[in-house]
Image (cartoon, rainbow, N blue to C red):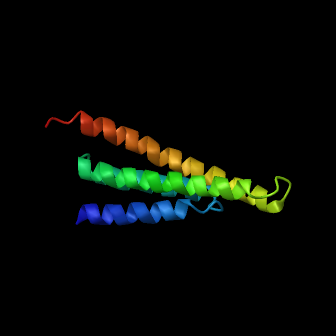
Amino acid sequence: MERFIARANIDHYLELLKDGDVPSPTRSTITTLLIEEEDKLGHDYEQLEFVESRAATCRARADRQRRLMDSFNPDSDDWVQAERVLVNFESLAQFVESYCHQMRRKVSNRPL
């Protein structure tokens, strides 16, 4: 049950972090909570698959945002807003990918 709740919380925190308008102190708090929930997952292959799927979603979101930004005129307000959102999405993707790397190392170092 604890893993189910941790996964739900992770999804919720990732959803909150997608918003580029989250103030820095709040973003820091949410990130801390996200890390705590990720640590509750344990380090087995099932949990690694879960985290990798979230990393893939974050990368896909950043890729879609990059394509959207590229469709705007670079001098437009839409482009500026799209760039700001892209920076946020890329940052989130890097954070989740970093956690995936940590989890991969821990899983690969576990005895069989």
- Rendering coords of residue 43 (x, y %): 26, 46
- Rendering coords of residue 65 (x, y %): 63, 57
The answer to which of 34 and 102 lies nearer the viewer is 102
- Residue depicted at x 32% and y 39%: 104
- Rendering coords of residue 7 (x, y %): 34, 62
Q: Is residue 36 visible?
A: no
Left or right relative to 85: residue 43: left
The answer to which of 19 and 27 lies nearer the viewer is 19
- Rendering coords of residue 2 (x, y %): 25, 63
- Residue depicted at x 65% and y 53%: 66
- Residue 108 is drawn in which quadrant? top left
- Residue depicted at x 77% and y 56%: 80
Left or right relative to 39: residue 96: right
Q: Compared to 106, does 44 lie above or below?
A: below
- Residue 73 is drawn in which quadrant? bottom right
**Which corner quadrant holds the N terminus?**
bottom left
The answer to which of 70 and 52 lies nearer the viewer is 70
Q: Is residue 89 visible?
A: yes
Total marks drawn?
A: 0
**Which corner quadrant holds the C terminus?**
top left
Q: Compared to 67, does 1 lie above or below?
A: below
- Residue depicted at x 33% and y 42%: 103
Left or right relative to 53: residue 85: right
> Can you name the residue that lies furthest to the left here?
112
The answer to which of 43 and 63 lies nearer the viewer is 63
